[in-house]
Image (cartoon, grey):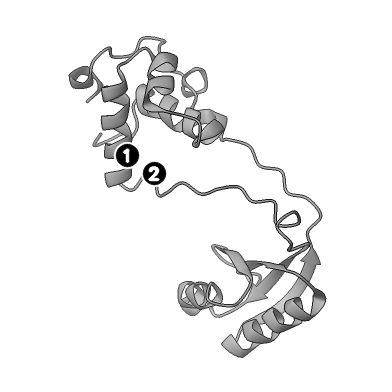
Amino acid sequence: MAEDPLNNLDRRILHLLQVDARGATDTNIASETDVTGTTVHNRIEQLEEEGIILGYNPEINYERAGYPMRVLFICSTELSERSEMAQKALEVRGVVNVREMLAGEENLHVEVVAESTSDVKESTQQLDELGLRTITSNILAEEHVQPWNHFHQEMAGEPDSLPDDDSAAE
């Protein structure tokens, strides 16, 4: 996996995990990829060890969980402090996601979930105390996410053939 970190089997496994990580067993993935469950298990383990798979997180409906407010804060900080500030922002109550932008003034996007506007105000104050300058904030109505389909073999432009044992997969 030196030059191209992913082979066709890896891409197919990643795609199937993105579609349904909770329900995707080694056996289910093996039947979709025409390899053994042991091969799938070994490949997933290797993808985790190499830092390609970072974790498995549930998708949460915050409104149904009692947190009807979702606010996206577009913030600014010095570029040299961006990563440090992102880590600090994660410690603020209600923060569920922080995205670092590569450049520009609007270089941290901070998502907060809350029960009420008073909770949002508290999060706003804590972000301000960190030294983040809020440029704008928006209440999020809906978020639409999909698996990145370029992991799928047809999208990867590779042949349909897959290795049939673990030694061929590596």
Outermost residue, left direction? 167
Q: Quadrant of the N terminus?
A: top left
Q: Amino acid at mark 1?
A: Leu
Q: Amino acid at mark 2?
A: Ile
Q: Of 125 and 161, which appears nearest the observer?
A: 125
Outermost residue, bottom direction? 129
x then y, percent, for residue 84: 46, 77
Q: Are marks 1 and 2 in contact (CB under 8 Å)?
A: yes
According to the picture, the residue beneath numbered tag 2 turns out to be 53
Does dot 2 land on a helix, a strand or a loop?
A: loop
Ranked by sequence position, the earlier of labels 1 and 2 is 1
Residue 66, image quadrant: bottom right
- In space, the residues marked 1 and 2 are separated at their CA atoms by 6 Å
Tell me the residue at 70%/57% (across/down).
65
Q: Which mark is residue 19?
A: none
Q: Quadrant of the C terminus?
A: top left
x then y, percent, for residue 100: 55, 64
| Image height of 53 relative to 113, above or below | above
Does dot 1 land on a helix, a strand or a loop?
A: helix
Tell me the residue at 37%/44% (across/down).
52
Tell me the residue at 61%/47% (across/down).
59
Tell me the residue at 71%/83% (across/down).
122
x then y, percent, for residue 92: 58, 78
| Image height of 130 relative to 101, above or below | below
Q: Of 122 and 106, which appears nearest the observer?
A: 122
Q: Pointer 2: residues within 10 angstroms few (<14), some, or many (20+)?
A: some
According to the picture, the residue beneath numbered tag 1 turns out to be 47
Q: Pointer 1: residues within 10 angstroms few (<14), some, or many (20+)?
A: some
